[in-house]
Amino acid sequence: MEFLKKSWKWIVGFISFFIGLVWFINANTSKKVKKIKKDIKSNEKKTKEVDKKIDEVKKKKKNTKKNIKETDKKIKKIKKQTPKTKKKTADEAASSLKKRIKKKN
C-alpha cells in the first residue's frame, strides 16, 4: 500500500503515456487511410479515362481495318481490269514520244 501512495504519480503517468501513444498512432493511421482512399479514388478516375481512350483506339482500329479491306478490294478490281490502249498511227506515236522527251529535259 505504501508503494502505491509513493508512486501513484508514476503509475498514472505510465498508463496515460500508453493511452496517448495508442491514440496518436490511431489518429496518424486514420490520416494515412484517408490519404490512401483519396489516392485510390483519383487512380480509379484516371483508369476510367484510360479505358475510354483504349475503347476509342479500338474503334478507330476496326474502322481502319475496314477501310483497308475496302481499298484492297478496289485495288484488286482495278488490277483485274485490262488497260484500254489507244490505237495510234505512227505519226501520232512519234509526236507524243517527242513531247515526252521535251518534258523530261
Image: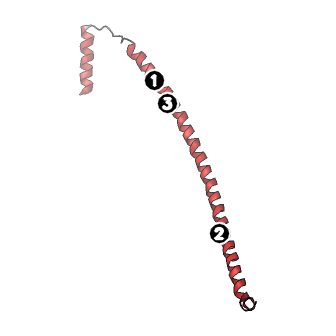
Q: Mark 3 or 1 closer to N-term?
A: 3
Secondary structure found at label 2: helix
- Which residue type does callout 1 highlight? Thr
Determine crowd level at label 3: few under 14, some 14-19, many 20+ residues with C-alpha closer than 10 A.
Answer: few
Q: Residue at x 63, y 62 (%)?
A: 35
Q: Could you tell me residue 42's position as x and y percent?
A: 62, 54
Q: Residue at x 72, y 92 (%)?
A: 6
Q: Quadrant of the N terminus?
A: bottom right
- Which residue type does callout 2 highlight? Asn
- Residue 24: image quadrant is bottom right
Residue at image mark 1: 71
Residue at image mark 3: 64
Say the numbered circle drawn on residue 90: none
Q: Mark 2 or 3 closer to N-term?
A: 2
Determine crowd level at label 2: few under 14, some 14-19, many 20+ residues with C-alpha closer than 10 A.
Answer: few
Q: Nearer the viewer, residue 91 or 85?
A: 85
Secondary structure found at label 1: helix
Q: Residue at x 59, y 52 (%)?
A: 43
Q: Nearer the viewer, residue 29 or 44?
A: 29
Distance of label 2 from label 3 (alpha carbons): 54 Å
Q: Is residue 55 left or right of residue 14?
A: left
Q: Nearer the viewer, residue 36 or 12?
A: 12
Q: Mark 2 or 1 closer to N-term?
A: 2
Secondary structure found at label 3: helix
Q: Could you tell me residue 26's position as x and y percent?
A: 67, 68
Distance of label 3 from label 1 (alpha carbons): 10 Å
Residue at image mark 2: 28
Determine crowd level at label 1: few under 14, some 14-19, many 20+ residues with C-alpha closer than 10 A.
Answer: few
Q: Nearer the viewer, residue 31 or 25?
A: 25
